[in-house]
Amino acid sequence: VYWLMKSEPDVYGIDQLKKDGRTFWEGVRNYTARNWMRDQMKVGHQVLFYHSNADPSGVVGIAEIVREAYPDPYAQDPKSDYYDEGAPADRWVMVDVGFVEKFAAPVSLAELKAEPALEGMEVTKKGSRLSVHPVSEAHFRKVVEMGRAKGRPVRAS
DNA sequence: GCCAACGTTGGC
DNA sequence: GCCAACGTTGGC
Protein backbone atom coordinates (compact mmCIF):
# COMPACT_ATOMS: atom_id res chain seq x y z
CA VAL A 1 0.00 0.00 0.00
CA TYR A 2 1.20 3.49 -0.85
CA TRP A 3 0.18 6.69 0.91
CA LEU A 4 0.10 10.44 0.69
CA MET A 5 0.56 12.51 3.83
CA LYS A 6 0.13 16.26 3.98
CA SER A 7 1.97 18.70 6.14
CA GLU A 8 2.31 22.45 6.13
CA PRO A 9 5.99 23.26 5.65
CA ASP A 10 5.72 26.03 8.25
CA VAL A 11 4.69 23.39 10.77
CA TYR A 12 6.79 20.42 9.69
CA GLY A 13 8.32 20.21 6.23
CA ILE A 14 10.47 17.77 4.29
CA ASP A 15 13.66 19.59 5.27
CA GLN A 16 12.90 19.05 8.92
CA LEU A 17 12.22 15.37 8.27
CA LYS A 18 15.48 15.09 6.36
CA LYS A 19 17.29 16.63 9.31
CA ASP A 20 15.50 14.51 11.91
CA GLY A 21 15.69 11.26 9.94
CA ARG A 22 12.39 10.18 11.42
CA THR A 23 9.51 11.68 13.33
CA PHE A 24 6.14 10.85 14.88
CA TRP A 25 3.09 11.95 12.96
CA GLU A 26 0.97 13.38 15.74
CA GLY A 27 -2.24 15.36 15.59
CA VAL A 28 -4.41 13.52 13.07
CA ARG A 29 -7.95 14.22 14.30
CA ASN A 30 -10.07 12.93 11.47
CA TYR A 31 -11.71 9.53 11.74
CA THR A 32 -11.21 8.50 8.13
CA ALA A 33 -7.51 9.32 8.26
CA ARG A 34 -7.27 7.69 11.69
CA ASN A 35 -8.81 4.48 10.39
CA TRP A 36 -6.35 4.25 7.53
CA MET A 37 -3.41 4.82 9.84
CA ARG A 38 -4.68 2.44 12.49
CA ASP A 39 -5.91 -0.36 10.26
CA GLN A 40 -3.89 -0.28 7.06
CA MET A 41 -0.49 1.35 7.53
CA LYS A 42 2.39 -1.07 7.89
CA VAL A 43 6.10 -0.66 8.41
CA GLY A 44 7.85 -0.25 5.07
CA HIS A 45 4.96 1.38 3.23
CA GLN A 46 6.10 4.26 1.06
CA VAL A 47 4.60 7.73 1.42
CA LEU A 48 4.38 10.74 -0.88
CA PHE A 49 5.23 13.70 1.33
CA TYR A 50 2.98 16.63 0.38
CA HIS A 51 3.32 20.27 1.36
CA SER A 52 -0.01 22.06 1.76
CA ASN A 53 -0.43 25.82 2.14
CA ALA A 54 2.94 26.10 0.43
CA ASP A 55 4.39 27.90 -2.54
CA PRO A 56 3.90 25.85 -4.50
CA SER A 57 1.85 23.17 -2.80
CA GLY A 58 2.83 19.75 -4.05
CA VAL A 59 4.71 16.52 -3.49
CA VAL A 60 8.21 17.26 -2.25
CA GLY A 61 9.63 13.81 -1.63
CA ILE A 62 9.23 10.32 -0.24
CA ALA A 63 8.94 9.04 3.31
CA GLU A 64 8.21 5.60 4.71
CA ILE A 65 6.35 4.15 7.65
CA VAL A 66 8.82 3.05 10.32
CA ARG A 67 6.41 2.36 13.19
CA GLU A 68 2.79 1.28 13.08
CA ALA A 69 -0.06 3.06 14.84
CA TYR A 70 0.11 3.65 18.58
CA PRO A 71 -1.80 6.02 20.86
CA ASP A 72 -1.18 9.74 20.30
CA PRO A 73 -0.36 11.17 23.74
CA TYR A 74 -1.04 14.74 22.59
CA ALA A 75 -4.76 13.95 22.61
CA GLN A 76 -4.45 13.60 26.39
CA ASP A 77 -2.39 16.74 26.96
CA PRO A 78 -4.49 19.81 27.88
CA LYS A 79 -1.64 22.09 26.86
CA SER A 80 -1.45 20.67 23.35
CA ASP A 81 -3.18 22.13 20.31
CA TYR A 82 -4.17 18.55 19.59
CA TYR A 83 -5.88 17.98 22.94
CA ASP A 84 -9.22 16.19 22.70
CA GLU A 85 -10.96 16.64 26.02
CA GLY A 86 -12.53 13.47 27.29
CA ALA A 87 -11.19 11.29 24.51
CA PRO A 88 -10.23 7.76 25.52
CA ALA A 89 -6.49 7.14 25.21
CA ASP A 90 -6.98 4.82 22.26
CA ARG A 91 -9.18 7.13 20.19
CA TRP A 92 -6.37 8.86 18.30
CA VAL A 93 -3.23 7.25 17.01
CA MET A 94 -0.01 8.28 15.37
CA VAL A 95 2.64 6.52 13.30
CA ASP A 96 6.33 7.18 12.88
CA VAL A 97 7.70 8.09 9.47
CA GLY A 98 11.26 8.10 8.19
CA PHE A 99 12.95 10.20 5.54
CA VAL A 100 13.63 8.48 2.22
CA GLU A 101 14.27 11.15 -0.37
CA LYS A 102 13.67 14.77 -1.24
CA PHE A 103 13.06 15.74 -4.86
CA ALA A 104 15.25 18.40 -6.42
CA ALA A 105 12.07 20.47 -6.76
CA PRO A 106 8.42 19.98 -5.77
CA VAL A 107 5.98 18.31 -8.13
CA SER A 108 3.37 21.03 -7.87
CA LEU A 109 -0.34 20.48 -7.56
CA ALA A 110 -0.75 22.16 -10.95
CA GLU A 111 1.59 19.59 -12.50
CA LEU A 112 -0.23 16.74 -10.79
CA LYS A 113 -3.55 18.00 -12.13
CA ALA A 114 -2.12 18.42 -15.64
CA GLU A 115 -0.76 14.85 -15.87
CA PRO A 116 -3.29 12.55 -17.56
CA ALA A 117 -1.79 9.46 -15.92
CA LEU A 118 -2.78 10.86 -12.52
CA GLU A 119 -6.45 11.27 -13.34
CA GLY A 120 -8.56 10.46 -10.28
CA MET A 121 -5.72 10.91 -7.80
CA GLU A 122 -7.28 12.08 -4.54
CA VAL A 123 -5.16 15.14 -4.01
CA THR A 124 -6.02 16.54 -7.46
CA LYS A 125 -9.74 16.56 -6.67
CA LYS A 126 -11.51 19.71 -5.66
CA GLY A 127 -12.18 19.92 -1.95
CA SER A 128 -9.71 17.14 -1.09
CA ARG A 129 -8.89 17.77 2.56
CA LEU A 130 -7.92 14.39 3.95
CA SER A 131 -4.40 14.67 5.33
CA VAL A 132 -3.66 10.94 5.15
CA HIS A 133 -4.94 8.70 2.38
CA PRO A 134 -3.86 5.84 0.12
CA VAL A 135 -2.46 6.31 -3.38
CA SER A 136 -2.49 3.67 -6.11
CA GLU A 137 0.81 2.06 -7.02
CA ALA A 138 0.58 3.44 -10.56
CA HIS A 139 0.02 6.96 -9.27
CA PHE A 140 2.80 6.62 -6.72
CA ARG A 141 5.27 5.49 -9.38
CA LYS A 142 4.25 8.25 -11.76
CA VAL A 143 4.68 10.98 -9.15
CA VAL A 144 8.09 9.62 -8.17
CA GLU A 145 9.08 9.58 -11.83
CA MET A 146 8.00 13.23 -12.13
CA GLY A 147 9.90 14.13 -8.98
CA ARG A 148 13.11 12.46 -10.11
CA ALA A 149 12.84 14.20 -13.46
CA LYS A 150 13.36 17.45 -11.55
CA GLY A 151 16.99 16.59 -10.96
CA ARG A 152 19.06 14.48 -8.64
CA PRO A 153 17.13 13.82 -5.43
CA VAL A 154 18.66 13.95 -1.98
CA ARG A 155 18.48 10.51 -0.38
CA ALA A 156 18.68 9.27 3.16
CA SER A 157 22.18 8.13 4.01
C1' DG B 1 -7.86 37.42 2.71
C1' DC B 2 -11.52 34.99 0.39
C1' DC B 3 -14.28 31.23 -0.16
C1' DA B 4 -15.63 26.36 -1.47
C1' DA B 5 -15.75 21.93 0.38
C1' DC B 6 -16.05 19.01 3.97
C1' DG B 7 -16.54 16.99 8.82
C1' DT B 8 -18.54 17.58 13.27
C1' DT B 9 -21.81 19.23 16.60
C1' DG B 10 -26.06 19.87 18.60
C1' DG B 11 -31.04 21.25 18.54
C1' DC B 12 -35.19 19.31 17.57
C1' DG C 1 -32.23 10.63 12.36
C1' DC C 2 -32.33 15.05 10.02
C1' DC C 3 -30.12 19.14 8.98
C1' DA C 4 -28.51 23.91 9.96
C1' DA C 5 -24.73 26.06 12.02
C1' DC C 6 -20.17 26.13 12.80
C1' DG C 7 -15.13 25.26 12.50
C1' DT C 8 -11.36 23.75 9.68
C1' DT C 9 -8.73 22.81 5.54
C1' DG C 10 -6.39 24.37 1.84
C1' DG C 11 -6.23 26.32 -2.96
C1' DC C 12 -6.00 30.52 -5.05
Image: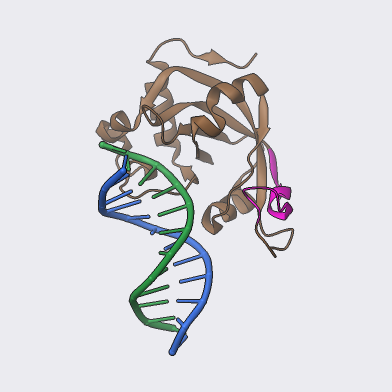
Chain colours: A brown, B blue, C green
Residue A127 % position (x, y): 34, 50
| Picture residue at 61% right of the left edge, 45% below the top | A41
| Picture residue at 49% right of the left edge, 45% below the top | A131
| Vertical order, A115 against A88 (above or below) | above
| Vertical order, A148 against A134 (above or below) | above
Please identify the quarter of the rendering in which residue A111 is found.
top left
Residue A23 % position (x, y): 67, 32
Residue C8 % position (x, y): 48, 52
Is-magenta flag for residue A71?
yes
Looking at the image, residue A106 sits to the left or right of residue A7; the answer is left
Boundaries of the magenta span: A67-83
| Picture residue at 59% right of the left edge, 36% below the top | A45
| Vertical order, A148 against A64 (above or below) | above
Q: Nearer the viewer, residue B10 or A70?
A: B10
Q: Residue furthest top?
A: A152
Q: Nearer the viewer, residue A51 or B3?
A: B3
Looking at the image, residue A29 sits to the left or right of residue C8; the answer is right
Is-magenta flag for residue A89?
no
Which quadrant holds the C terminus of chain A? top right
Looking at the image, residue A144 sits to the left or right of residue A82; the answer is left
| Picture residue at 60% right of the left edge, 48% below the top | A37
Mark count: 0
Which quadrant holds the N terminus of chain A? top right
| Vertical order, A118 against A132 (above or below) | above
Residue B2 % position (x, y): 26, 48
